[in-house]
Amino acid sequence: MIATLRFALAAAICLVTGEASTAALARPAFLHATLPADSTYRQLFETGEAFPDFVSRADRRKEQWERNYAGAATDALVARVTKAGSGWRLLVVTVPGCSDSVNSVPYLASLVERLPGVQMRLINSSAGRAVMEAHRTPDGRPATPTVILLDESFNERGCWIERPASLLAWMAEQQGKVSDTDLFDGKMKWYDVDRGASSLDEIVAMIEAAARGERRCGSTS
């Protein structure tokens, strides 16, 4: 994975197919271990944008990014991540126009804002092309958003890709029964009702798994 990513740091091709309030507990034991830093992920993370900067430059769906960011993360989610320790970093590959990103990433940013022990940075699909290629959707596509969970040494501990499992299942059930336009409209209505809850639950579960020394990658466990 590291070798696969190194060649892409200067890639310029955009490949996009998808539209703490409580005291921190002790970090998991494996986070205290001395691990070599993944220099590729470190560079990608350190050159990424903070969420407010990304939104300020957004040339598409700007109002939707801002509106969804205003959605408050629940105290229960904050407590779950806090229990999973600190030192986590989330690297997100996304683009402003992605309909899946705008319905997940702003809610994630709202949660991260309440977690002083967690950081998030966003990179575009050109810089993150190799990341997407190495973490594909169930049907084989590189897509945005691709969320990579990194530990404090910038080593990958999990990933979350494009859409929550419940939405994937709904779309698979509808595929071929309705037009592409109706499928997209249905997806957006699903997101309007869900308001980031399913995506956040899965991403938090990914962090919890990493805290147990497990790796969860994808929209399902």
Image (cartoon, grey):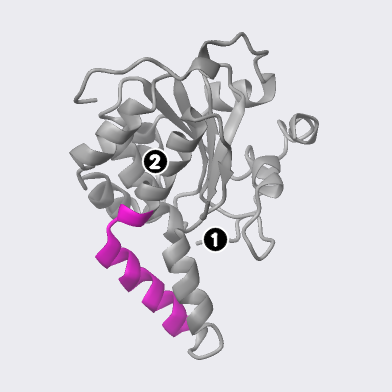
Decide if residue 138 is on the left or right side of residue 76: right
Q: Amino acid at mark 2?
A: Val
Relative height, residue 171 to residue 205 (above, below): below
The N terminus, quarter of image: top right
Along the line of sight, the residue nearer the viewer: 33 or 54: 33
Q: Which mark is residue 18?
A: 1
Question: Is residue 55 among what the camera can see?
Answer: yes
Element assignment for label 2: helix
Element assignment for label 1: loop
Q: CA distance from mark 2 to mark 1?
A: 22 Å
Q: Which residue sits at x=63%, y=26%?
A: 41
Other-residue count near label 1 (Cα within 10 Å), few / some / many at <14 / 14–19 / ≥20: many
Relative height, residue 146 to residue 2 (above, below): below
Q: Is residue 184 magenta?
A: yes
Q: Which residue sits at x=43%, y=35%?
A: 208
Q: Amino acid at mark 1?
A: Gly
